[in-house]
Image: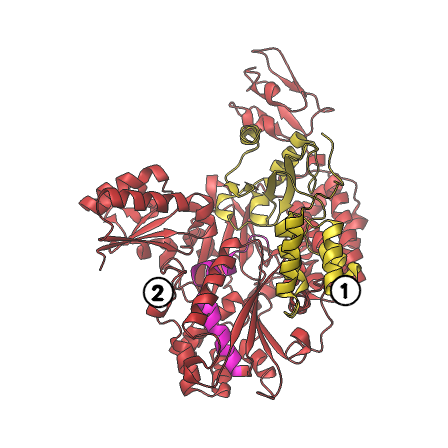
């Protein structure tokens, strides 16, 4: 028995900021202090508070240390672990109150969350199957195989009201039901969509990194429900840590007989293989993903036939997203009523969001459906940094839209987000402040779709390119009001005619910004001005002669020598030479450079 | 600096043997083409014509099919990458925090466009979509090293580390 556990985050965010070195150093220091038998070091998955990384939690006190560096380790060991004195300067700032130091779960960031899909993330060692089993892992699979019929399983999932967490929100139970006919007589497949390509969304990655076994267990449950004996996990190659932990997990599950032949001594056999993606966003679309597993260019196929009828290798297939899978074992164990008691009328349970952009607490949060955007951004997210004003939140990535401040109090669920022109998407939530230009953001997403369009159908291949050109015309100051109408018309045309989800939703970023920020478009078109000061062709950099002290810092750093002036005299920017890179603004210590 | 568009193929006998062994190992799996190409890229660092041809011949499929897959996915490279591979995250979270300008400045400093490699083979530059370190935005990676909370004026010092 250990008297203390040190949990260090080994997710991608914290690994990027050096958590591996911290773990090495911890082992070293514990050895030095002869504590290796008393204190255990556990490398966990993501804790969610990525902005404060690398993070560390020490139990039994549940003290949450943030932004820990390698150099802090000796102090933590000698003070906290040896002498029992908390190192106050390293405690996460929000956990420090007048009443002393709060435990992790009492901080605003965690208190407002309900963690189901993420319940093991940051809690267990993802590379140990025993720790997963210790928290009730594989119990649901055991229950299903020994006490439930396949139809019971499907009924349970249907009753829970669980909807697909990958974006479109299709009822999971129904999807399984469609694929359940003719059990035992035909080859079927269960697939996991872990090709999380939506830029700014990283919840699936965190589940895979923090709790890989939950996905394996859930897929086996589905295999039993529909009568499949083979599963595939299609995971982004850009997620090396997730891939590695999945490999380990599959190996362990096979060794324990939880994957393979005759699981739990029953007739049921099920195995899972990994397939790595190769960097194509369209492969997140279900038919494209299957085409890719088959070893082809990942182009989507027309539906119908739906995958439940003719999917992978022409066999009936169900495909669910990582977060959807992560909910399944809990629903089996706690019952569908428990799950359905959370959320709104048509959206049950919780949803994980990846908070990013202009927000203090960047990271991963899991909230009950129906929580308002205000709670997510102002309370859990800790608001906008630098005293700036909230402008919009973008959900659904390149397929979604922007939610303006006027909808700050709308309860977040699938249908509400659709009704205001955005979508749930996989759960990326990027916050934008007054410095973000909405036309530029629309252009950013269109650039993305143009790059990622597979080229199979014309509305998407040519249409998105034309949309991008029109947006460029606007941000360059060459557009007329006539172009704005054409832009909107083309959006609707693409929505109606593109073959797959990628194309059909590609115009959403344009349509939603047009809906809520039309003034900003008009300002670009009519007055040739970018109010946020982002669109380079429409802004000029100037130096305020009142404020300039002539320190020469800007002119020495200007990459194109566009700034002239004598030392100690106000400087001037040569607008013909200026490339508007912003270096001078960054360098000026007197706030003298401004954007006009 | 000029850029590399084509380089003579310098595959070794050992690499060729490894490739053949990989194909042998995976050929009976369903949908084996992509896993084989991924392994081949691990072996050679990229997928030159010669390697694609070997795969096509061994699997008895047209080379157009191999080339089609290679050009569809952004992770397959037809040209070698630099000794130091720089990838700047242009995911949404990084973009709203200014990674676009980081990318532009790197293009200018290195004299190459995204997807290209410097003539001395030292640096290659790519834009990537979300490395998942959104808490550190804006982020870039040089090989496996992650640089977060970047500002453009740090770039010279960072590049200098690799000179």
A420 in relation to A516, above or below: below
Q: Nearer the viewer, residue A325 or A334?
A: A325
The chain painted yellow is B
The chain painted red is A
Q: Quadrant of residue A279?
A: bottom right
Q: Is residue A458 left or right of residue A92?
A: right
Label for residue B61?
1
Disc 1 crowd, CA 10 A, few/some/many (<14, 14-19, 20+)? few
In the picture of the structure, the residue carrying the numbered disc 2 is A131
Question: Residue, x 47% and y 42% (percent of image)?
Answer: A385
Looking at the image, can residue A455 be seen?
yes
Q: Nearer the viewer, residue A199 or A432?
A: A199
Residue range corresponding to the magenta coloring: A199-225
Please state the chain letter of the residue tagged with numbered disc 2 in the rendered image: A
Instruction: Name the spot of residue A3 as percent of width and height, x first.
Output: 21, 55
Q: Is residue B109 magenta?
A: no
């Amino acid at each position: 028995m250990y008297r203390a556990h040190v949990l260090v985050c080994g997710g991608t965010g914290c690994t990027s900021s050096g958590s591996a070195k911290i773990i090495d150093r911890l082992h070293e220091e514990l050895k030095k202090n002869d504590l290796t038998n008393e204190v255990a070091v556990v490398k966990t998955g993501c804790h969610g508070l990525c902005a404060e990384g690398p993070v560390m939690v020490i139990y039994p006190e549940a003290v949450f240390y943030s932004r820990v560096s390698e150099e802090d380790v000796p102090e933590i060991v000698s003070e906290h672990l040896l002498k029992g004195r908390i190192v106050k300067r390293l405690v996460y700032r929000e956990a420090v109150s007048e009443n002393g130091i709060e435990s992790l779960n009492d901080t605003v960031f965690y208190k407002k969350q309900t963690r189901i899909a993420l319940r093991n993330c940051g809690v267990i060692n993802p590379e140990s199957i025993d720790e997963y089993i210790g928290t009730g892992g594989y119990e649901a699979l055991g229950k299903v195989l020994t006490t439930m019929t396949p139809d019971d399983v499907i009924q349970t999932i249907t009753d829970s009201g669980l909807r697909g967490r990958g974006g479109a929100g299709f009822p999971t139970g129904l999807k399984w039901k469609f694929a359940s006919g003719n059990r035992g007589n035909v080859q079927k497949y269960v697939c996991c969509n872990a090709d999380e390509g939506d830029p700014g969304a990283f919840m699936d990655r965190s589940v895979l990194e923090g709790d890989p076994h939950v996905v394996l267990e859930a897929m086996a449950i589905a295999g039993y429900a529909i009568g499949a004996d083979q599963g595939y996990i299609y995971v982004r190659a850009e997620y090396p840590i997730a891939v590695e932990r999945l490999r380990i997990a599959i190996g362990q599950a096979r060794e324990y007989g939880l994957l393979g032949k005759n699981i739990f001594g029953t007739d049921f056999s099920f195995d899972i293989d990994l397939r790595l993606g190769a960097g194509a966003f369209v492969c997140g679309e279900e038919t494209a993903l299957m085409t890719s597993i088959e070893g082809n260019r990942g182009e989507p196929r027309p539906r119908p036939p739906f995958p439940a009828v003719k999917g992978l290798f022409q066999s009936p297939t169900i495909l669910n997203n990582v977060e959807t899978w992560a909910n399944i074992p809990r629903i089996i164990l706690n019952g569908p009523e428990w799950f359905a008691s959370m959320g709104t009328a048509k959206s049950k349970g919780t949803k994980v969001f990846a908070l990013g952009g202009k927000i203090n607490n960047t990271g991963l949060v899991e909230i009950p459906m129906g929580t308002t955007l205000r709670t997510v951004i102002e309370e859990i997210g800790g608001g906008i940094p630098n005293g700036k004003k909230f402008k919009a939140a973008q959900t659904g990535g390149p397929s979604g839209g922007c939610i303006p401040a006027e909808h700050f109090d709308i309860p977040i669920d699938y249908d509400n987000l659709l009704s205001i022109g955005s979508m749930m998407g996989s759960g990326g939530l990027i916050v934008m402040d007054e410095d973000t230009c909405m036309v530029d953001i629309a252009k950013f997403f269109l650039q993305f779709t143009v790059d990622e369009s597979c080229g199979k159908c014309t509305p998407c291949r040519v249409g998105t390119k034309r949309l991008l050109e029109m947006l460029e015309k606007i941000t360059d100051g060459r557009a007329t009001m006539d172009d704005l109408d054409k832009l909107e018309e083309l959006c609707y045309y693409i929505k109606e005619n593109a073959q797959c989800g990628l194309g059909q939703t590609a115009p959403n970023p344009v349509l939603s910004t047009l809906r809520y920020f039309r003034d900003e478009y008009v300002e670009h078109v009519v007055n040739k001005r970018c109010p946020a000061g982002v669109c380079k062709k429409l802004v000029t950099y100037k130096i305020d002669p009142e404020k300039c002290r002539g320190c020469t810092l800007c002119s020495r750093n200007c990459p194109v020598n566009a700034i002239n002036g004598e030392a100690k005299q106000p400087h001037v920017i040569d607008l013909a030479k200026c490339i508007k890179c912003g270096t001078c603004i960054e360098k000026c210590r007197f706030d003298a450079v401004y954007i006009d | 600096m000029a850029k590399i568009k084509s380089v003579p193929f310098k595959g070794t006998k050992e690499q060729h043997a490894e490739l053949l062994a990989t194909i042998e190992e995976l050929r009976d799996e369903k949908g084996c083409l992509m896993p084989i190409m991924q392994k081949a890229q691990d072996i050679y660092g990229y997928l030159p014509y010669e390697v694609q041809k070997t795969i096509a011949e061994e699997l008895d499929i047209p080379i157009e099919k191999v080339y089609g897959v290679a050009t569809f996915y952004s992770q397959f490279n037809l040209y070698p990458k630099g000794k130091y591979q720089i990838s700047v995250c242009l995911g949404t979270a990084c973009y709203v925090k200014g990674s676009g300008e980081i990318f532009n400045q790197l293009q200018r400093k290195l004299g190459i466009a995204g997807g290209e490699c410097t003539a001395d083979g030292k640096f290659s530059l790519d834009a990537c979509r979300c490395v998942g370190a959104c808490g550190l935005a804006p982020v870039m990676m040089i090989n496996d090293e992650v640089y977060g909370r970047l500002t453009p004026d740090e770039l010279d010092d960072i590049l200098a580390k690799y000179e």
